[in-house]
Amino acid sequence: MSDLLLGIDVGTYSSKGVLVTPAGQILKSHVVPHGIDMPQPGHVEQDADNVWWQDVVQIIRELLNGEPYSGADVAGIAVSAIGPCLLALDEHGRPLRPGILYGVDTRAHAEVAELEREYGEAGILERSLMSFTSQAIGPKIRWLQRHEGSVWQQTRTLTTASSYLAFRLTGEHVMDRHTASHYMPLYDPRKHGWNEALADEFLGNVRLPRLGWSDSPLGTVTSRAAAQTGLREGTPVAVGAVDALSEAISVGAVRSGDLMIMYGSTTFFILVQDVPTPDTRVWTVSGAFEGQYNLAAGMSTTGSLTRWFRDEFARDLPEERAYDELFQAAQNIPPGAGGLLVLPYFSGERTPINDTKAKGIIAGLTLSHSREHVFRAVLESVGFGIRHNLETFRALGADIKRVIAVGGGTKSQTWLQIVSDIAGVTQLVPAKTIGASYGDAFLAGLVTGNVTRDALMHWVGEAQEVTPNPTTTEVYDHQYQAYRQLYLQTRSVIHSL
């Protein structure tokens, strides 16, 4: 009987697929690495067909190659991807240019300022429940209109990465409401729908996808997609989600008060809420399931910062062991990294400072510092950024009941402990931290009826607790205050550079 569930996630630097039973058992998985394109400073892109879609095809064919499973065994599929992204399609649904990525792409800072003048800060907050940042798609749409007029003239549909992949599978243009929230000012978060009048004014004859909740059916696999992938024609496809939202689902962060911290190339936060707490510093968006809101936030360079460090300063270490050796060495450095302090703003910063012109800083260097000191300071800088975001959430009156950690960074006990010590929070690390693809498989199960929402905690399993070490409080409180001051006191210099 066809009851297996297929989940695929396309991330910033790799894509992953899992084949799962209705009980949550992983039968097969496959990972495909890829890169990003940075054609000029502040521009971050990926090719929709040669990266996103080809990754999906390769993963499905690997998982369903007949050893021992085939497309006939799959009951349903859901796909997530990086986002929010901006992808312009022509009248035939073909990409007209590479996809413009989420908040790490900061090209539209002039358009952000322009839209802020047009709508006013209070008007923007009232309309969208958050402010314009590099995460917002509206300014990037205006950038496209202004700087690539020939592309805009041919554009008939605007979509995002996960929605494009679902379109390639089903022929249907549908976007999850969480991602659509970032298409501000075109989305009405109170009604969980497009502002049709404003969309007509903003876009002209260009259309947006219809909207759905992440656990809703989107369509079924077409004959063309079946031929390309090996899936069975007619296989149900869920609406799916942005990668961070699927990651939250994968670790059971679905109840009000659950906060997911995703340690990926960037660090992303999703707090599940019944009632929104809007603020200009963070993002208020629709949730995965009907009626839910998420208070969301994101740092721009975290895992990608450790990758940069490895690639540039640890070339002497074998690639397969480089991270293990760096983290082990950092563990032997005392808290505070010998007086070093790093600002991790290597691609600008998203929340809560929302400064696209911010840059990275390594402060306090002396001749006595080693590579290991600097790497420890890099890890601590992420902890300070996480603390800054959590303090912002609490200042809004947001109720945080559980903190659940997920993502590639959770493989390092050293990093988890640093964050718990700096932020003063206990983190739950589920036994299964497979990632967003696992959450996608669960969404596929909801759509097919093979699982119920109550089954999620069984899928997630037991969790390890990482508790703060009180002996580090004094040094980290001092370092954190210095971290906050370092940005404020160097901002004008960094902007001038």
Image: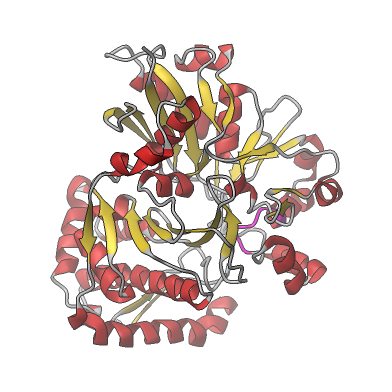
- Using the rendered image of the protein, determine whether residue 73 is visible from the camera's viewpoint: yes
Quadrant into which the C terminus falls = bottom right
Q: Mostly what secondary structure, the magenta segment?
A: loop
Residue at x 47% of width, y 81% of height: 487
Corner quadrant of residue 376: bottom left
Residue 360 lies, with reference to residue 59, above or below; the image says below
Range covered by the magenta-colored residues: 133-138
Residue at x 29% of width, y 46% of height: 433
Q: Is residue 334 left or right of residue 94?
A: left
Magenta span includes 153: no
Residue at x 54% of width, y 45% of height: 289
Q: Position of residue 495 (x, y in %)?
A: 58, 77
Q: Position of residue 296 (x, y in %)?
A: 52, 60
Residue 37 lies, with reference to residue 61, above or below; the image says below
- Using the rendered image of the protein, determine whether residue 85 is visible from the camera's viewpoint: no
Residue 221 lies, with reference to residue 126, above or below; the image says above
Residue at x 44% of width, y 14% of height: 230
Of residues 61 and 369, the one nearer the viewer is: 61
Quadrant into which the N terminus falls = top left
* Residue located farthest toward the left when viewing the structure as drawn: 332
Q: Is residue 254 left or right of residue 27?
A: right
Magenta span includes 137: yes
Of residues 32 and 209, the one nearer the viewer is: 209
